[in-house]
Amino acid sequence: MTWYTGDGTYDTLLAIGLAFGGFVFFVSWFLPSPYGRFASKRFGVSVNPKLGWFLMELPATVSFLVFFAWGPRRGELVPLVLLVVWLLHYGNRGFFFPFSMRVARGEKGTFSLVVLGTGWLVTTLHGYLHATFFTRLGPHYGPEWLIDPRFLGGLSLWAISLALNIQSDAIIRDLRTREEIAAGVREYRIPRGGLFRFVTSPSYLTELLAWTGFALFTWSLASVFILVVSAANLVPRAWASHRWYRERFPDYPKERKALVPFVW
Ligand SMILES: NC(=O)c1ccc[n+]([C@@H]2O[C@H](COP(=O)([O-])OP(=O)(O)OC[C@H]3O[C@@H](n4cnc5c(N)ncnc54)[C@H](OP(=O)(O)O)[C@@H]3O)[C@@H](O)[C@H]2O)c1
C-alpha cells in the first residue's frame, strides 16, 4: 500500500497504527489500561511499575536510534536537531520518569504485562515511524525548515507543554514522601497546585499538547499516529480518573474539570 510516503512498508504500518488508535479509543472507555489506580488481577501477571514503565518506554529510544542510524540523511542538520528533541523527550519519559517514581517498598506489581506488551508494539512502531521519516522519507527537512512558522510554533508548544508535564508529574510524585515509601505505604491523596487547580489530569493534558506541538514541528503523520494513540488512551483515562477521585474524596474540588480547563 502506498498513499503517504510512497514506501509500501512504511505506509502500511502507519495505517495499521492509526487504525489501532481507533480501536484503543473504543476499548479504553470500558477498560482503562490496567496499571496504577486501575491495576487489576483480571489481567494476569503484573510487574513493579518502575520496571514496567522503563521496559515499556525503552523501545521508543532503541528503535528510534537504530532506524535513525540507518537513514541516509542521518548527518544532516534538521534530522540532527530532531534527534536532540527526541532524546530530550525520552530522556524524561523513558529514564527520569520511571527512575524517579515513588514506589512503596515491597509493593506487589501494579503494571500489567498486557500493558507492557501492547506498549512495546506502540513504542517500537513509534520509534521506527519517526526515525525513518526524519532520515529517509520526510521531504521537507532542508535547513530552511528551522525557520518555518510550523517548526517554530510547534517546537515552542512542545517545550512549554513538556515543562508543564514534568511539573505535573513532580506534584503527583511528591504526594508520597520518601519515608512513606520506605515504610511500604501506598496512599492516594488529592494533588493541588500547578495545573491541578484546573483539571484532574494535567499530565495527560500537557502530554497531548506536547504531541500536538511535535506533530506541528515535524509536520508528519508519524507524530499524528502517536498523538492519536495517546489521546485514545488518555482521554478516557482522564475521565475515569476524574470519577475515581470524586468518588474517593468527598472534599474533591468541585470546580476542577477532568482534562480541559473550564470545559470538560
Ligand atoms: N503518551 C501516552 O500514551 C501516555 C500514556 C500513559 C501515560 N503517559 C504519561 O506518563 C505519565 C504518568 O502517567 P500515569 O498514568 O502513570 O500517571 P499517574 O496516575 O499520575 O501516576 C504516576 C505516579 O504517581 C502516583 N500517583 C498517582 N496518583 C496519585 C495520588 N493521588 N496520590 C499519590 N500518588 C499518586 C502513581 O502511583 P500508583 O502507581 O500507585 O498509582 C504513580 O507512581 C504522565 O505524564 C502521562 O502523561 C503517557
Image (cartoon, rainbow, N blue to C red):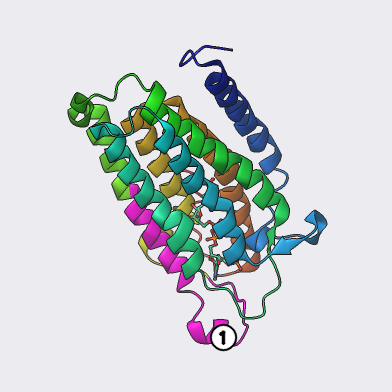
Ligand 1, seen in the image, is in the quarter at bottom right
Place residue 163 in its image quadrant: bottom left
> Residue 87 in the image: x percent, y percent?
37, 49
Is 203 in front, or is 221? 221
Looking at the picture, does residue 77 appear above or below residue 169? above
> Residue 81 in the image: x percent, y percent?
27, 39
As shown in the figure, which amino acid type bears the numbered disc 1? Ala
Write the start and end of the magenta stretch as one range: 161-189
- Exactly how many numbered labels are in the figure? 1
Residue 198 seen in this snapshot: no
Looking at the picture, does residue 187 appear above or below residue 38? below
- Secondary structure beneath label 1: helix
Seen at 56% across and 81% down, the residue is 181
In the image, is 199 to the left or to the right of 46?
Answer: left
Looking at the picture, does residue 70 appear above or below residue 65? above
How packed mark 1 is, by other alpha carbons closer than 10 Å (few <14, some 14-19, many 20 or more), is: few
> Which SS type dominates the magenta stretch?
helix
Seen at 70% across and 67% down, the residue is 109
Seen at 54% across and 19% down, the residue is 11
Is 159 in front, or is 198? 159
> Residue 192 in the image: x percent, y percent?
43, 67
Looking at the picture, does residue 10 appear above or below residue 57? above
Q: Which residue is mark 1?
A: 182
Residue 183 seen in this snapshot: yes
> Residue 36 in the image: x percent, y percent?
63, 62
In the image, is 4 to the left or to the right of 31?
Answer: left
